[in-house]
Image (cartoon, helix red, strand yellow):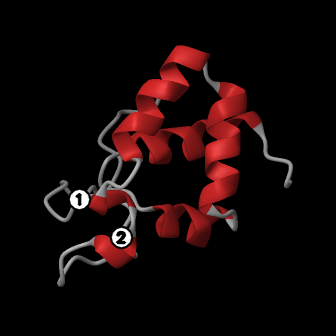
Amino acid sequence: MKEFTDRQLDRIIEMAWEDRTTFDAIQFQFGISEREVIDIMRREMKPSSFRMWRARVQGRSTKHAAKRNYGIDDTRFKCSRQKQITHNKISKRR
């Protein structure tokens, strides 16, 4: 199994929890299979949280690209309706 930083593990877990992010998108970004995502979730989560997550995603069409409706872009990593940020509006301390 690949070694990931804490930040990468947090992102993998976050993507796995998101209903619209497919396992294929996780594989594209991190190079790990659905089985490896499941193993990470099992290892990193409390048993009750893992069981709840597993029950949610098992067979869910939005988590499996092959089961998705035609026309959904599987390579996106955010909702198409999400606001596009073009520049940082936070003022910097000088």
Asked if the residue at tag 2 contacts the one at tag 1, i.e. Cβ–Cβ closer than 8 Å, the answer is yes
Give residue 11's position: percent from left, percent from top: 56, 43
Res. 8 in view:
no
Residue under circle 1? 79
Note whether 18 is above or below 81 in the view shown. above
At a point 58% along the width and 46% down the height, the residue shown is: 12
Name the image quarter holding residue 38: top right
Give residue 67's position: percent from left, percent from top: 30, 72
Say which of 31 and 63 sits in front: 63
Say which of 6 and 20 sits in front: 20
Say which of 22 and 82 sits in front: 22
Q: Is residue 24 left or right of residue 38?
A: left
At a point 48% along the width and 46% down the height, the residue shown is: 16
Q: Secondary structure at mark 1?
A: loop
Q: Which kind of residue does numbered mark 2 sit on?
A: Arg
Give residue 54's position: percent from left, percent from top: 47, 37
At a point 49% along the width and 26% down the height, the residue shown is: 51
The N terminus - image quarter:
bottom right
At a point 72% along the width and 30% down the height, the residue shown is: 43
How many dots with numbers? 2
Q: Residues within 10 Å of mark 1 (few under 14, many from 20)?
A: few
Q: Which kind of residue does numbered mark 1 sit on?
A: Cys
Q: Residues within 10 Å of mark 2 (few under 14, many from 20)?
A: few
Residue under circle 2? 76
